[in-house]
């Protein structure tokens, strides 16, 4: 069973359904918690080698993102494959994965 299915089954079993807008807010909030941990662990960038993003916070963010994908009826694996293909094309074309914007 893939991760998205596991999250969907957990949400269903625990009556945690929510509209997509709430799922998006939860995802942003969880990523904010990861950002806070990274910022404080690196003394706001002055010691990048000290970066620490606790597994539980990353897990919360991943759960929220997978729940959002499920609510929007987006296959997370397919979305990831699309993104990887986009980055590979950029690297092939320009030597850089960034969008250049």
Image (cartoon, grey):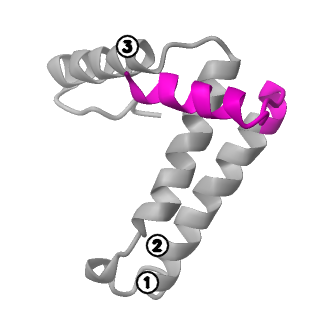
**For the residue carrying disc 3, how many other residues have a C-alpha within 10 Å: few (<14), some (14-19), or many (20+)?**
few
Q: Quadrant of residue 65?
A: top right
Secondary structure, magenta segment, majority class: helix
Q: Quadrant of residue 85?
A: top left
Q: Contact, CB < 8 Å: mark 3 with mark 1?
A: no
Q: Position of residue 15 (x, y in %)?
A: 79, 33
Residue at position x 37%, y 13% in the image: 82
Secondary element under disc 3, as helix, strand or loop, is: helix
Residue at image mark 2: 38
Q: Contact, CB < 8 Å: mark 1 with mark 2?
A: yes
Q: Looking at the figure, which quarter contains the N terminus? A: top left
Residue at position x 21%, y 24% in the image: 94
Q: 3 or 27, which is in the foreground?
A: 3
Q: What's the distance in space between the residues labelled 3 and 1, CA to CA?
A: 33 Å
Magenta range: 1-22
Residue at position x 84%, y 27% in the image: 19
User: On residue 82, which mark appears?
Assistant: 3
Q: Is residue 33 magenta?
A: no
Secondary element under disc 1, as helix, strand or loop, is: helix
Position of residue 34 in the picture relative to residue 67 (left or right): left
Q: What's the distance in space between the residues labelled 2 and 3, CA to CA?
A: 28 Å
């Amino acid at each position: 069973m893939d991760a998205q299915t596991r999250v969907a089954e957990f949400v269903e079993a625990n009556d945690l359904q929510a509209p997509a807008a709430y799922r998006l807010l939860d995802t942003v909030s969880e990523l904010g918690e990861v950002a806070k941990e990274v910022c404080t662990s690196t003394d706001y960038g002055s010691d990048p080698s000290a970066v620490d993003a606790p597994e539980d916070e990353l897990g919360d963010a991943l759960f929220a993102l997978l729940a959002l994908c499920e609510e929007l009826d987006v296959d997370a694996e397919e979305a990831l494959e699309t993104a990887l293909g986009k980055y590979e094309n950029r690297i092939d074309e320009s030597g850089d994965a960034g969008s250049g914007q």
